[in-house]
């Protein structure tokens, strides 16, 4: 029976990016997905590459997020070399819009906090903000400009990475659920998927919000995995609008929601953050929240056509930080829990896994993301229900 160097469980942006980096190192990689790769959270994302923290709990993530944003142009370049030109990455910046009685105070605090973290941001007058995006609401009271922020269309990116993986001759097994991870003593030796044993020296768990329970949320067989990867689903509702008149060139964002321009007049609006389990329903309340925030940002959006609605399940973790690192089972590595930032964090995650597989090295600063940090802790999920979200 053939033995692979690496078996990757999950073909979302994280698993696919890891496969891409490892195949570039001439390693023999198998990527296993229970569905079509790229149809999970990665398909649902807005694609903002935004390293600024949205809360105090996200502060430890900032250095990793900044590094990943820096890696993005090179990451896209490598994918283009292995597939074809990629047209859906843009570094046009973002405008953060503030309203309400404390608008200027809130803006100045964000500017000062982000500058302290080394994130490029500056206050901008509303007059200049409107020169950049004329659709900004007349009710806006303050604005900040983040020139380095970028966007990517996650669906197109997934298509390009998968094309590159085929070119690299990575074996992609779609419609093939992993039901267990094989172990021999303290070492993992591969996976069982679609009833077949697949041998591999290294196993990477990148199954998004399903990582804790590979065979479904009620499964017990792989319960031990949830000690390392205690993920939970966090629903995000989204919609896409189309307008021939409104042309956005950069991200418009408030603390209630965002508008992200795509090509040909398509604008993505989001989102919600909901702890409702493995439930992908769209709700009237969710869509209303998104539309309220979108129209508040740019009132003319009220005339745009709604062309698509969808939901996705973000991979949350107990502290809402990603879970990236080796376990105490030899050869088993976890790369999940990227929550609201998986698209942004894909290049740096893939680089970390590559260095670990190749040289057995982890960056010293990555200890806070270790899967071993949950040992002996109460893994109560960190809930935040039904609020509008920034990604
Ligand atoms: C509405 C919304 C907006 C977002 N916006 C942004 C944004 O603007 N910027 C950003 O950086 N991030 C954003 N995110 C977050 C981002 O989408 C996620 O962090 C990222 O997609 C996670 O990628 P992943 O590969 O870990 O998971 P997924 O994309 O969910 O992939 C996991 C894969 O594992 C497979 N799988 C599951 N179980 C098994 C099994 N037993 N066997 C084999 N395969 C299995 C699944 O089929 C799936 O393909 C957003 C998310 C949502 C929902």
Image (spheres, helix red, strand yellow):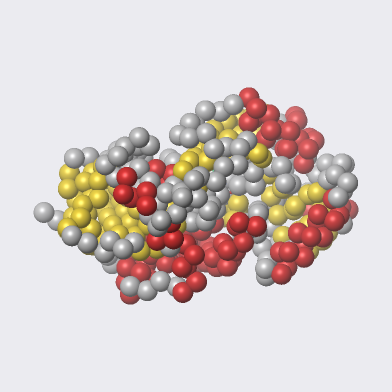
| Left or right relative to 283: residue 231 | left
Residue at 65 percent across and 27 percent down: it is 285
Between 273 and 264, the residue placed more toward the observer is 273
Q: Quick check: 216 above or below 335?
A: above
Q: Percent position (x, y) of residue 175?
A: 30, 38
Q: Residue furthest left?
A: 1
Q: Residue furthest top?
A: 284
- Residue 374 in sight from this viewpoint: yes
Q: Percent position (x, y) of residue 17?
A: 41, 57
Q: Percent position (x, y) of residue 143?
A: 81, 54
Q: Quadrant of residue 83?
A: bottom left
- Residue 157 in sight from this viewpoint: no
Q: Quick check: 387 above or below 391?
A: above
| Left or right relative to 280: residue 147 | right
| Left or right relative to 231: residue 213 | left
| Left or right relative to 163: residue 118 | right
Image quarter of the N terminus: bottom left
Q: Percent position (x, y) of residue 225?
A: 33, 50
Between 233 and 372, the residue placed more toward the observer is 372
Between 348 and 304, the residue placed more toward the observer is 348
Residue at 45 percent across and 73 percent down: it is 363
């Amino acid at each position: 029976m053939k033995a692979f160097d690496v078996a990757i469980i999950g073909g979302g942006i994280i698993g696919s990016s890891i496969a891409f980096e490892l195949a570039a190192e001439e390693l023999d990689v198998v990527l296993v997905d229970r569905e079509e790769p790229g149809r999970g959270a990665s398909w649902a994302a807005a694609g903002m590459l935004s390293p600024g923290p949205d809360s105090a709990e996200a502060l430890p993530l900032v250095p990793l997020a900044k590094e990943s944003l820096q890696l993005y142009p090179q990451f896209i370049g490598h994918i283009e070399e292995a597939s074809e030109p990629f047209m859906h990455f843009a570094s046009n910046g973002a405008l953060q819009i503030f309203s309400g009685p404390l608008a200027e105070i809130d803006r100045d605090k964000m500017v000062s906090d982000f500058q302290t973290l080394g994130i490029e941001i500056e206050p901008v007058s509303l007059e200049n903000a409107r020169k950049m995006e004329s659709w900004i609401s007349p009710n806006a009271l303050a604005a900040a400009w983040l020139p380095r922020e970028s966007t990517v269309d996650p669906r197109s990116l997934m298509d390009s990475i998968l094309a590159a993986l085929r070119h690299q001759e990575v074996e992609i097994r779609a419609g093939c659920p992993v039901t267990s991870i094989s172990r021999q003593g303290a070492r993992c030796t591969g996976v069982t998927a679609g009833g077949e044993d697949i041998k591999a020296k290294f196993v990477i768990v990148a199954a998004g919000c399903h990582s804790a329970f590979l065979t479904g949320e009620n499964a017990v067989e792989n319960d031990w995995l949830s000690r390392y990867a205690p993920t939970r689903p966090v629903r995000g509702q989204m919609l896409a609008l189309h307008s021939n008149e409104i042309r956005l060139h950069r991200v418009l964002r408030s603390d209630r929601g965002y508008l992200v321009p795509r090509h040909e007049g398509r604008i993505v609006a989001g989102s919600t953050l909901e702890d409702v389990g493995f439930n992908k329903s769209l709700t009237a309340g969710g869509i209303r929240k998104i539309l309220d925030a979108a129209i508040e940002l740019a009132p003319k959006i009220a005339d745009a056509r709604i062309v698509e609605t969808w939901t996705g399940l973000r991979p949350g973790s107990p502290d809402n930080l990603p879970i990236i690192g080796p376990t105490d089972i030899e050869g088993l590595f976890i790369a999940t829990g990227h929550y609201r930032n998986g698209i942004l964090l894909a290049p740096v995650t893939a680089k970390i896994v590559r260095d670990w597989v190749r040289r057995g090295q982890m960056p010293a600063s990555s200890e806070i993301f270790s899967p071993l940090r949950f040992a002996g802790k109460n893994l109560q999920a960190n809930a935040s229900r039904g609020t509008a979200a920034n990604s």
